[in-house]
Amino acid sequence: MTTYFTKDHEYVRVEGDVATVGITDYAQSQLGDVVFVELPGVGKSYKQGAEAAVVESVKAASDVYAPISGEVVEVNAALADTPAMINEDAEGKGWFMKIKIADKGELAGLMDAAAYKAHTA
Amino acid sequence: MLNNQGRPTAAGEATASAHPTFTGNKALQVEEALLFEIGRAEVTGVDLDEPEAVKSRLGGLERKGAIGLVGLSEPETMRHFVRLSQKNYGIDTGLFPLGSCTMKHNPRLNEKMARLPGFGDIHPLQPQSTVQGGLELISELARYLMVLTGTSAVTMSPKAGAHGELAGMMAIKAAIEAKGEGAKRNVVLVPESAHGTNPATAALIGFVVKSVPARDDGTVHVEDVKALLGPDVAAIMLTNPNTCGIFEPQVVEIAKAMHDAGAYFYCDGANFNAIVGKAKPGDLGIDAMHINLHKTFSTPHGGGGPGAGPVVLSERLAPFAPLPFIRKEGEKLVMVEDASDAGSAQPFGRVTAFHGQMGMFTRALAYMLSHGADGMKQASEDAVLSANYIRAGLSDLMSIPFPDHPSMHEALFDDEWLKDTGVTTLDFAKAMIDEGYHPMTMYFPLVVHGAMLIEPTESESRASLDLFIMALRDLAMAAKKGDTARFSGAPYHAPRRRLDETRAARTPILKWTPPAPAQAAE
Amino acid sequence: MRYLPLTDQDRKAMLAKVGVADIDALFADIPADKRLKGLVDLPRHKGEAEVERILGRMAAKNVPASSVPFFVGAGAYKHHVPATVDHLIQRSEFLTSYTPYQPEIAQGTLQYLFEFQTQVSLLTGMEVANASLYDGSTGTGEAVLMAHRVTRRNKAVLSGGLHPQYAEVVKTLSHMASDTVVSAPAKPLGDEDLAALIDDQTSCVVVQNPDVFGNVRDLRPLAKACEAKGALLIAVFTEVVSLGLLESPGAMGADIVVGEGQSVGVGLNFGGPYVGLFAAKSKYLRQMPGRLCGETVDAEGKRGFVLTLSTREQHIRRDKATSNICTNSGLCVLAFTIHMTLLGEAGLTRLARINHANAVKLADMLAGVKGVEVLTKSFFNEFTIRVPGKAADVIEKLAAKGVLGGVPYSRLAPKAGLDDLILVANTEVNTDEDRAAFVAALKEVV
C-alpha cells in the first residue's frame, strides 16, 4: 500500500488496482469547515486531471480533480450527511472515492509523502 | 447643584452578561420573535369588507386547505418591524466603509420625488400618451449618463449591476454574431481581481473565461492582455478604477489592443463614482459599461436591493441595444417595445419585462440635479481625498500591498501586518463592529491576502474620518500588542455574537416550520 | 453643497496630511490627455425646491392610476398598499443598510428575509424559497436555466399563455446561451396541448397561471406529462394575490415556481423596481439562483440568521455560479413581507375574494356592451375581451375620455394577429362607479 499526492492536495492510496482518493489533511485545514461534498456517480470514468468532485466550505468551493485516470468503483456516501468527517479524518474516514486505476504509469508523475510535505511547507 | 451625591457614572468592572435580564432584552435592544411565532391566522391589520357573493368563476381550482399564513394587527406589525430595524446598521447609523459598495448618503429628497404619484403610481403598460413625463424622466437621466460617460447610447432597463453586465455582454455577443464571428470568438478575458459577477456573467451566456494575471503593482498591463489576444477573443471585462482601488494606467492602451484585435472592451462601472466629472469612460475607449445607480448616484441599497444598472454603449454597440428604448417623434416620446418598430436598429432582444427600475431612475436624477456638474465632480474628489486620507492615517500601522499608486475612492490593505498576531482579517472586522462601525470589505479582491478594502465615500466629515482613523489605530495597536481577546470573541456588543455559519450550511433551515406536536401516543 | 460635509479648509488640511500639493495629484494615473479640464456640460447644483419644481413638472404630465378609473394589468397590478408599509421601509436601518454580509449587525434584514422565504414557500406550496430575484420576468429566465442544470437538457417549452415580455426574456437568454426554446402559439382561450410538445430533450415546460389572457389553468395533467418525460414543470404567476384563492402551484405538481410579487406592498412604479419570487422542491436547492437566508445560532447559543449556501453564488463560484445575480430586491421584499404580515391568512384570502368578485361583476357588465365579447370563462381578477376594430385604438379613445381601460394584447405582441383583444384587470381599488364609468365610456367608443 503506497500513498501518492498531487499538487492540488489530493491523496491517492493504492491497494492493488484500486486507488482511494480524497483531499489531504493540509487541504482540509486550509478550506475550513467542510459543509458539502458533491461526489461523482459510480461507474463514471475520468481522465487524469478532470473535475470529478466538489468540496465546499462556508466561503469557498474547490474542484477535486481525478488524480489518475480510471473508473469510479465506489464513493463515500457517508460524506453526504457528515461532511465534517473530512475535517476530522481527511486521510482516513473522510475519503471521497475509489478509482479502478486505468494506467499505473500515471502514478510516477505524483508526489510521495516527503515531496508533498516539502510542497506544502 | 444637581448630581452632587456621589452617584457613580462609570459602569464598574462587571460586564453586561453578568447582569442577565428576565426578558433577555438589553434596554433598547429588544429581542423579537419570528412573525410566525407571534402572528395568528385569524388576525389581520387591513380592514376589508367581505365582498358580495358572486358565483365563482375559478374553474373549480379554488384552494382546498389553508395557506398557513399568519397576520398581525397594525400596532403589532409596526412594533415587529421597528424592532427588527433596530438590529441593523445603516449609512444613517455611522460610517459604512464597505469597499466596492459605495455606501454614500442617500438623500431623502430622492425618496420624496420617487413617491410623487406621477412617477410612483403609473403603470408600465398604460397608454404612452398618459406617461409622457415618465418617458421624459428616463430620457433626461439617459442624457445625463451619456454626458458623464462620453458615450452616445445607453440602455436603461437592466435591473442591477450584474444584470447590466449581462445586457452589455449580450450586446457584444450580438455584435460579434452580426459580423459572422459568433462561432469563433468565444473567449472573454477577466482579470484575477475582478468582481465575481464578471466571470459568472460571461459564463452564463456561453463564453469561456480566461484569467488575466495582475502585476505586482495591482494593475493590468497591456502586454499581459496582448499575450492572450487572438481571433478567439471576444472581449475583456475590466473594472476601472479596479477593485484594488487603482485607476488602470494603461486602460487606453488596453482598449486599443482589444479593438485592434477585433474584440470589445466591457468596463465594469462599479467604481465609476471615483471619476465622475474627472474623466469620461468613452474617452478611454470603452464599448460598454454598466452604472450602478445605487452606488454612484446615491439610490439606497435597501438591505440588498433593488438597484439599477443602465449600460452605456459605444457607437459600435449602440445598434444592438435591447428593447425597450425611447425614440423622439416630433414632440412626442415613444417607447419602442417590439423589434418590428425598431427601424434600422437590431436589438438583441429583451432583458426584462417593462422598462427598468423607474423608482431608481427618479432618485438618481434627483441626486444628479441636486449635485449638478460642479457637485458631482466635487463628490468624486472628496471621495478620493477621503480614501487617501484614511490610507495616510493608517499606513504606518497597516500594510499596503500596492503603495506605488495613489488610491482612488477606496484604500486597500492586506493582512501582512497581522502576521504572528493571532488576529485575522475577520477578527479585525468583527472588532470594528464593537467600535460602532460597519466592517470594511474583507477578503476581496482575491489577489490580496486577507484583503481589507476601505471606502469612506464623500459623505463623511473630517471629524468623522479622524475618529475612524483613531479607532482603527487603536485596534491595530491592540492587535500588535497581543490583546487577542478583543478580537477573537468580537463582536461582544452587537445584537448577536458571531454566528455559526458552518451549522447553517451543513443543516440548512430556510423557513419556519411549526414545532413538532408534543409526543403523540404510539 | 448640502450632501458634502468637507469644507475647503478641511480639504486643504487633508491634502497636506496625504502629502500632495493638489487634488489632481491623486488622479495622476488617469492619462493627462483624458483628464477633464473644466466641468461636464450639465447644469450646476440646485436647491431642493428647484429640483422639486423640475421633477414635479415632469410628474404632472403623467396620469396616475389613482386619479382615474383604472383597469390596466398584464403583469403589474394596482392594489392598495397600507400606509404602514411605506413608513416602515423608510426606516433608516432598512433603507440605508447593505446586503447582510455581517450578520451580527444585520439581524433585522436577515430575519425578515427568513420570514419572507417562509411566506413565499407557503403561498406557492413549495419546500424552499429564496430571498428574491429582480422581478418575475428575469426570475423566469433563471428558472429555465436552473431546469437545464437539473435535467442536463437544454430545450425549454413555453406556453402561449406566458406573458409575451417574459417569453422574450427567456428567448433572449436562451439564444445567448445557445439553448433551445419551443414556443406554443398564443391561444386566448388557453386551449393548448403542451404535453404534445414535450420530448426526451425537454428540460422544462413554462406555464403561467392565471395565464396572460386571464385563464385559470389546472396544472395537474401537465405536471404528470412532464414527470413522465423527465422534464420539470415551471409554474409562473404575475398576480400573487391570486394565490390567496387558487390552488397553489406546488399542490398542482410544479417543480419550480416563479412569479411577480409587485401586487403586495410594492406599487406600480412604471415597471420597477418589483420583486421576483422564486421557490422550488428542496431536492433542487443547490441549483437555485439567488440569496438564501438560513437559521443558526450565535456564540452564546441564541437563535440568529445568516446568508447561507453561498457557494452557489458568483462571489464565490465565479464562472461556475448558478447565476450572476448579486443585488436582489431587498427593500421590495421588506415591503412585500410587511404587507403580507398585515394581511395575514384572513386578509389575503378576503382580498383575493374581493378581487375575484369585482372582476366577475365587471365581466358581466362588459358582456352587456354591444359588440364586446368576454372571452375568458375561468379567471381570477383579469380577463380578455374582444372589441370591434383595433384594441389599441379603443384604449386610446378610452384614455381620451379619462378611463384607462386595460392593455391591448397587440401592445405586448404586435405580430400575433390578435389586434382586437384587450386584457382587463379589476382589483379591490375599483369601485362600482369606476366600473360604470368604464362601461359607459366603452359604449361610446365601440
Image: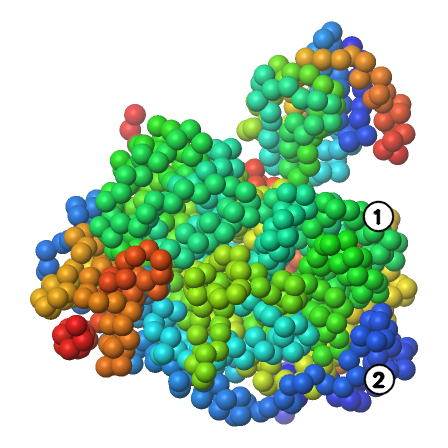
Task: Please tell me the numbered disc located at residue A91.
Answer: none
Q: Within 10 angstroms of label 2, few (less than 14), some, or many (20 or more) residues?
A: some
Rendering quarter of residue B134: bottom left
Q: Within 10 angstroms of label 1, few (less than 14), some, or many (20 or more) residues?
A: few
Task: Point out the frontmost of discs 1 and 2.
Answer: 1
Q: Quadrant of the C terminus of chain B?
A: top left
Task: Please tell me the numbered disc located at residue B227.
Answer: 1
Rendering quarter of residue B45: bottom left
Residue ID for mark 2? C13
Q: Position of residue C112 (x, y in %)?
A: 46, 58
Q: Is C173 situated above or below A98?
A: below
Question: Which chain is disc 2 placed on?
Answer: C
Q: Position of residue A73 (x, y in %)?
A: 62, 14
Q: Is residue B19 visible?
A: no
Q: Is B94 situated above or below B486?
A: below
Closer to us: C18 or C181: C181
Q: Residue at 75%, 58% (x, y): give it.
A: B259
Q: Residue at 29%, 81% (x, y): give it.
A: C67
